[in-house]
Amino acid sequence: MKAITQAPIEAQGHQPLMAFSLEKIQFLDTDGNWLCERPSFASDQWLVQAYKHMVLNRVFDSKAIALQRTGQMGTYPSSLGQEAFGTAIGMALQKDDVFVPYYRDHGAHLLRGHKMSDLLLYWGGDERGSASGPQQDFPICVPIATQITHAAGAAAALKIKGQDQIALVTIGDGGTSKGDFFESLNVAGAWQLPLVVVVNNNQYAISVPREIQCGAPTLAQKAIGAGIHGVQVDGNDVVAVYQAILEARQRAHLHKGATLIEAMTYRLGDHTTADDASRYRSNEEVKQAWLNEPIKRLQTALHQLNLWSAEQEQAWQQQCGEQVDQAVQTYLNIKPDSAESMFDYLYQDWPEVMNEQLDLLADKLARQQHK
Ligand SMILES: Cc1ncc(C[n+]2csc(CCOP(=O)(O)OP(=O)(O)O)c2C)c(N)n1
């Protein structure tokens, strides 16, 4: 039988047009060693503050999961293993910036001044939990990727008004496959918007691994097609994520437009409390990922700099536990809102057609009372 040979692809007439390159930012390796000089913002005090907040974030997270497991809260998306991501964002944002979060940003929210009890209230299904924090920030967004279109709009408003704040939006790796993402990046490039897009690439979109989510080797390179700056950072390195945002802010101030930051993290927990990650990934994979987690590496770096001791660790863990317990008590003592309140935050002008649904609800509640 005659072998079939592949005809070579014709390459005549080709000339180089453009070449692109991407950079990655990392300061601390997985063992807490500095890979290069400490940046000037990362003072002793800054490093300790970042560390303490990451620990608080983790303690909050495990309590929130426990509340859901015991029927005292709704479905909750854990940020376990992604504490450097939220902490760096919360520390890098200025008070009057516009933060447009997704649903896994508890660390950043706490630094934005959200009351811990309000976060629990929100995840307990009560919209009043969205009330605290800077008023220009957007509410937690659960629909995938819709928030990035709003963030582009907010950035456009800042630009039109000549204000020098940034709009910073977070999104998951899965969210970067959506049209909303590409459209927003496109407008950010076309209009040179002061927009910072930070992707929490935690390697999974529920059960869909990153490798089959997208054919490109990095998500940062999606910036190139939009004509904006893209960079990848070690998302388990709080110093690197902060540095990337700092540079993005400078770029926005120099009117050089938007930045896409792909932060490489790993979701150590389940997608949410409604998920069981052991059904789609191996224990071995998770065990390996634990070696790379963000808190241990910063703790090692602090020990090496003589900035943190075992006694301080014990005292801080206890303080975090107490702070979280207090927030839980506040949350549990809040009287549930009326069932009708679910309609409260939807419309500026009440559409008459909704009265039918209100009547149905009133009917249902009345029947429940008579049971
Ligand atoms: C518009 C829309 N489609 C589908 C869903 C269901 N959903 C919830 S989370 C999720 C995966 C998101 O993964 P990713 O963007 O990687 O973020 P992660 O949860 O991993 O942080 C999906 C598809 C949704 N919330 N909104």
Image (cartoon, grey):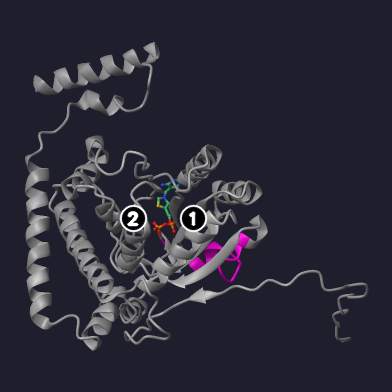
Along the horizontal axis of the image, is 256 left or right of 165?
Answer: right
| Circle 1 residue | 196
- Mark 2 C-beta closer than 8 Å to ligand 1: yes
Vertical comparison of 138 with 258: above or below: above
Q: Nearer the viewer, residue 198 or 259?
A: 259
How far apart are the two marked residues, 1 and 2, measured between alpha carbons? 17 Å
- Answer left or right for 176 relative to 83: right
The answer to whether residue 70 is magenta is no
* Residue 241 falls in image quadrant: bottom left
State the residue at coordinates (23%, 65%).
Answer: 53
Quarter of the image holding residue 212?
Answer: bottom right
The reply to whether the C-beta atoms of the residues labelled 1 and 2 are less than 8 Å apart is no
Residue linked to disc 2: 104
Residue type at mark 1 is: Val
In the picture, the quarter occupied by the C terminus is top left
Read off the magenta span.
207-223
Q: Dot 2: what SS?
A: loop
Q: Position of residue 247 (x, y in %)?
A: 49, 65
Task: Give the image location of residue 268, x and y in percent.
Answer: 31, 69
Q: Residue 191: percent from the left, percent from the top?
A: 63, 46
Q: Is residue 84 above or below residue 296?
A: above
Near mark 1 (Cα within 10 A), the count class, few <14, some 14-19 or many ≥20, is many
Q: Give the number of the disc on residue 348.
A: none
Q: Nearer the viewer, residue 305 or 338?
A: 305
Distance from mark 1 CB to nearest ligand 1 atom below 8 Å: no
